[in-house]
Amino acid sequence: MTDHNFSVQQLLEMAACTNCQMCADVCPAVKASQKGDLSAVARMQGLKKILKRRTGLLRKLFGVAEPTAEQWQEFSNSVFRCTLCGNCHEVCPIGIDLKELWLSIREDLVNVKQFPKKINMIRNNLEESHNVFDEDNEERADWVEDMRAAPDHGYQKDRAEVVYFTGCVAAYFPLAQKIPIALAEIFEAAGVDFTLMGEDEWCCGFPLIGAGLKDLFQEFVDHNLEAVRAKGAKKVIFACPSCYAMWQEHYPHEEIDIAHASQYLLELLQAGRIPLKETKMTVTYHDPCDLGRGTREFDAPRDVIRAIPGVHLVEMPHHRENCLCCGGGGNLEMIDAKLSTAIAKNKIDDVLQTGADAVVTSCQQCVRTMTTYAKRNKVPLQVMDITQLIKTALGD
């Protein structure tokens, strides 16, 4: 790890940190673990110490030793036990881009071979299978077989106006597969000309970026862009906020319109293309980190919910840019499942304060994380994606 791996702006931001502790106050990992060494401010201090030991004047003049194996491990544990939720960045009073800094640090830790063993698993799975779970990529669209009346082409057309980019979680986890099934049925009802890419869809690349494996990322970008272009599509829809954020931030897509499913569903509703029946429910809405704080989309999902006759929306104590993370981001579930679960508990506690019948979100990973916690702990709470809510309210 050397200071040359960080941009000039990041070096200036490190120096500008005032140690105000505001980042620690909102960190879901700190709250769940009660360990201050997982906070952004502690991580920043650790980074400064390591940079001084490796490249600083003290080392050059006085021969200060490089960090010990124990010091490397302590720092790496802090860096990788983070959901990358971005709340520290949200509250930083001087505007340090902390989320981008954490990604840069992860990349550097991989370069100096100081990282959790699970990072090698992520690398191997994506290199060999093109999805983070090491499943057969030819089975990426097998969820279509569970639909009641899927067409013979299984939504894999040679050409279509819209590509639905499913994402790894929804493609392979039975619990999350309800989301693409619901969205496909909504598209059918709305008369949307859409296609899946099937095995031609590779992971969006977020697990690579989040694991510090940026050197592998470009191959996935190039492949997915070419696969979409081959379909002649003018629009790509994502139900996964991480996939959407990756395309928005890292994919050159000037000739392709991209949208999160909540945004596209709102367009269809406003055009009168989705028939809805009255559905009596009180729901609260969970802002996924990558959709809310990441892409600043807070309103479209709420507008969709309010468009459903009979559905009443109540807000959690923490919502919009202050929404609590579900615990499922940043590859944390693979690195420290216990901490991920503890973060999910705090999220569910926030949900329960509303008294809502269900918590609705716009993310397959959030659905999976919150549902898993609720089921394992026998919490009487319905968790659903916004696509599932619309599907429930679909008129005949």
Image: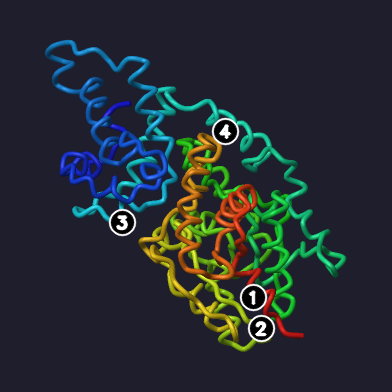
| Disc 1 and disc 2 in contact, CB within 8 angstroms | yes
Residue nearer the viewer, 77 or 55? 77
| Label 4 to label 1: alpha-carbon separation | 36 Å
| Label 4 to label 2: alpha-carbon separation | 41 Å
Residue carrying label 2? 274
What's the residue type where badge 3 is placed? Answer: Glu
- For marks 3 and 2, the one nearer the N-term is 3
Mark 2 crowd level (few <14, some 14–19, many ≥20, 10 Å Cα): many
* Whole-percent x, y for residue 236 in the image: 59, 65
Mark 4, secondary structure of its residue: helix
Residue 143 placement, left or right of 37: right
What's the residue type where badge 1 is placed? Answer: Ile
Q: How many numbered dots are placed on residues in this image? A: 4
| Label 4 to label 3: alpha-carbon separation | 30 Å
Residue 106 placement, left or right of 392: left
Mark 1 crowd level (few <14, some 14–19, many ≥20, 10 Å Cα): many
- For marks 4 and 3, the one nearer the N-term is 3
Q: Measuring 27% from the left and 55% from the top, which residue is drawn there?
A: 91
| Disc 4 and disc 2 in contact, CB within 8 angstroms | no
